[in-house]
Image (cartoon, rainbow, N blue to C red):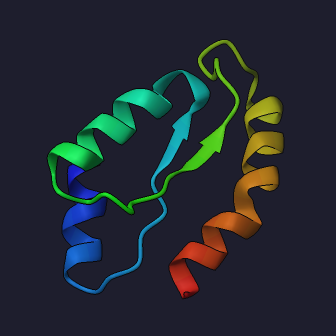
Amino acid sequence: MHDGVFFEDHGIPTATVVSTEFVGAARAQALALGATDYRTVVVPHPIQPLTREEVRVLADKAFDEIVRRLTA
């Protein structure tokens, strides 16, 4: 979160990806950093037990949103 907020504050678009388990923590960090409008890209939790192919499917689903954030 710190890096994402830092870069956004300096005009560099970011796409911070978090799993559903960490949405609240990411929001709390953004608020603590004064980034009340900072948004994350959210993917389903858990990620750790997934196979490489399952992670690839998650990435494919998030891809368009990530590109949108980076090119906005």
- Residue 30: x, y in percent? 28, 48
- 27 or 16, nearer to the observer: 27
Residue at x 67%, y 38% (from the top left corner): 43
- 64 or 59, nearer to the observer: 64
| Figure check: 18 above or below 44 | below
- Residue 26: x, y in percent? 37, 38
The quarter holding residue 60 reads: bottom right
Residue at x 37%, y 40% (from the top left corner): 27
| Figure check: 51 above or below 52 | above
| Figure check: 30 above or below 35 | above
* Quadrant showing the C terminus: bottom right
Residue at x 52%, y 78% (from the top left corner): 70
Q: Which residue lies furthest to the front in this view?
A: 36
Q: Residue furthest top?
A: 49
Q: How many marks?
A: 0
Q: In this view, does 17 lie to the left or right of 49?
A: left
The quarter holding residue 65 reads: bottom right
- Residue 13: x, y in percent? 41, 78
Q: In this view, does 14 lie to the left or right of 69?
A: left
- 24 or 49, nearer to the observer: 24
- Residue 67: x, y in percent? 64, 75
Q: In this view, does 65 lie to the left or right of 60?
A: left
| Figure check: 49 above or below 2 | above
Residue at x 26%, y 60% (from the top left corner): 35
